[in-house]
Image (cartoon, rainbow, N blue to C red):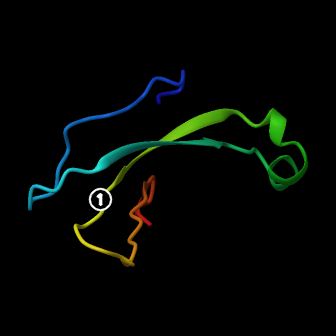
């Protein structure tokens, strides 16, 4: 989903050919700690786009979360 809630997807795949499942995660952007804890309805809504890559076979599998941000990968 984009800012208006539209679903996001693309044909991105890993070098080994594995294709990830597109996920859209609703989130928000609080302006301060008070709003994040006590006034969540006032937070501007946004959506995070993600890809979930799950290997073949039975789990459990380790998880790696890569979050690019304004300071690079965090």
Quarter of the image that includes the C terminus: bottom left
Q: Mark 1 points at which residue?
A: 53
Residue 29, compared with residue 71, is above or below; it is: above
Report which quarter residue 15 is drawn in.
bottom left
Q: Circle 1 sits in a helix, a strand or a loop, which is it?
A: loop
Q: State how many labels appear.
A: 1
Residue at screen point 20% across, 44% down: 12
Residue 39, compared with residue 5, is above or below; it is: below
Report which quarter residue 18 is drawn in.
bottom left
Q: On the rendered structure, is 7 left or right of 28? A: left
Q: On the rendered structure, is 48 left or right of 60? A: right
Residue 45, compared with residue 68, is above or below; it is: above
Q: What is the crowding at mark 1: few (fewer than 14 residues within 10 Å), some, or many (at least 20)?
A: some
Residue lying farthest to the left in this orientation: 16
Q: Position of residue 16 (x, y in %)?
A: 8, 62
Q: On the rendered structure, is 61 left or right of 35? A: left
Residue at screen point 22% across, 67% down: 56
Residue at screen point 31% across, 74% down: 58
Q: Nearer the viewer, residue 61 or 70?
A: 61
Q: Position of residue 13 (x, y in %)?
A: 17, 50
Q: Where is residue 27 in the image (x, y as percent from the top left)?
A: 62, 43
Residue 18, compared with residue 7, is above or below; it is: below
Report which quarter residue 31 is drawn in.
top right
Q: Where is residue 37 in the image (x, y as percent from the top left)?
A: 85, 54
Q: Nearer the viewer, residue 23 or 72?
A: 23
């Amino acid at each position: 989903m984009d800012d208006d809630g539209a679903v996001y997807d693309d044909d991105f795949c890993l070098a080994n050919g594995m294709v990830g499942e597109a996920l859209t995660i609703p989130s928000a952007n609080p302006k301060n700690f008070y709003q994040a804890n006590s006034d969540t309805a006032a937070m501007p809504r946004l959506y995070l786009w993600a890809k979930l890559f799950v290997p073949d076979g039975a789990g459990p599998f380790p998880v790696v979360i890569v979050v690019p941000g304004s300071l690079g990968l965090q």
